[in-house]
Image (cartoon, rainbow, N blue to C red):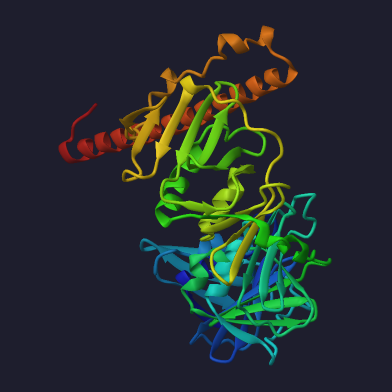
Amino acid sequence: MQITLHRSDLYRFERLVNKLVRPSELPTAIMFSPCPGGIMLTAFCENAVMSMIVPDVNITTSFSLPWSALKELMSKKDDGHVDFDVTDVQITATWSVNGIPQCREYIPPKLTGKRIPTMPENSVTHSMQLFDVLADAAKCTEAESARNPLGGICLRGRKVIATDGRQAFLHDGFAFPWENDVLCPTSRIFGSKEIREFSDVIQVGVIGDQIGFQVDAVTFWFKQIDGRFPKLDQLLEKRDKLTWLQLEPGDVEFTLQRLDNMPGKSDHDSPVYLALNHEAVAIRGHDRLQKSTTELQLKNSRYEGNHVLVPMNRRFLKNALEFGIHRIGFDAVGRGHVIGYSDSQRMFLWMPLEGDEPVCDPEKLTTLASNVNTSSVSRVGKSEPVKPVPTKQPPVLATAARRVPVETNPANMNTIQTAEALCTSLYETLQNTRRLVRHLKQQKKQDRLVRNTLESLKQLQGIRV
């Protein structure tokens, strides 16, 4: 039996499977089987299966190839085709690369008892928004976390729900044709651009312990996660007694641009402190070692209720802002869950941190305000323009690690301060090492360009160096 496939189709399928599962869960083989209107490519992973139909290709019997063979046969560009000569004991593949003929022989692996489920009749259809929501929900799960042994996304009634025990994501507005909770594993396929190239319509169905998604010619199934997903109803109580913050879009963008670079990122839980009082709506980050503080003042945002000071993990705050959460409620008394809304459909909750805010040294305070084109800064009460961030890194070999201040010399520090100083030193050493590696790679690339240029000159001008 002889067939011909485009190498770009093999590439698309390989990319989809790589987004479907983790690298450790990739299949060992790919199966080619006949189907109405074309040929079906199928990959059977440990807890997932994916198929893609390639139209206008006809075969009479199924065969399989080692998964590793795709690396040789596929091509990202529409770079020709590959011809297969299939027998019971051997498969010969021939193709060309830049006009140079290529040929490989493979022993077909055995795939017995493997089949892909068929989408059930009671499946439902949704727009691509479902995958957008599932991709957002995946940011709130930690499969390796002891707080969340499930590590999946719950499809319950009309809701998509995800939690890792410290943050929870809820999105309402979908209709699922099952009564019980369905726990779907997280996957990069939901946020991939590759799956969106096929269609903007999704078909969803459940058969036994399998949940399937079909997007035009692509179908994939997951094995559901065993376990019971927690109820979150108790977290929604007392919402009428909260202090509510209304964030303006300009302040949201202003915060997202600076949140990752605020002091304290390398500390445990990466804390920031959100303060709502008569002076300002502010977010502060502290460098405990250097005793410096950066404060973001959100001049355009307003709140209703009591004064609030809430420490929180900046990753949770960043997730909320990226989810479009602009209305956030705080328990000013008990420091319970922080609850945020984007609209009537989406809600995000997260746990604040414990402990008091570090004392701020006025001499080491930097204040950034969002009211003047989000680019004014005040330092110790004096206003001055923000200096643009340099696009070029300083020379790697000239970058020095920060020194521990005299007042926090190891001879005068307690155990916790010593550990924090060591953590900071190791973090900076890692950053300097990464810069050095980037510098060496760039230098190597430049040296290669010089060598290639000299070789070209020798060929064109006959010059010997």
Please report the residue visible at 49 percent of the width from the left and 22 percent of the height from the top: 362
Q: Residue placed at 70% from the left, 89% from the top?
A: 120
In this view of the protein, which residue sits in the foreground, 299 or 137? 299
Quadrant (top left/top right/bottom left/bottom right) for the C terminus:
top left
Q: Compared to 22, does 9 lie above or below?
A: below
Q: Residue furthest left?
A: 461
Is 368 positioned to the left or the right of 70 in the image?
left
Residue 27 visible in this rendered orientation of the protein: no
Quadrant in the picture for the N terminus: bottom right
| In-image side of 25 versus 146 (left or right) | left
Q: How many discs mark residues in the rendered view?
A: 0
- Residue 352's x, y, as percent? 68, 46
Res 118 → quadrant? bottom right
Seen from this angle, which residue lies furthest right? 227
User: Compared to 346, does 354 lie above or below?
Assistant: above
Above or below for 223 versus 430: below
Residue under the point 47% across and 26% down: 365
Q: Is residue 174 or residue 390 the one in the foreground?
A: 174
On the image, the x and y values in percent for residue 138 come to: 63, 60
Q: Position of residue 146 (x, y in %)?
A: 80, 49
Nearer to me, 198 or 53: 198
Examine the image and state in which quarter residue 414 appears: top right
Instruction: Report x, y in % for residue 260.
Output: 51, 41
338 shown above or below 288: below
Question: Is residue 53 visible to us here?
Answer: yes
Of 140 and 314, which appears nearest the observer?
A: 314
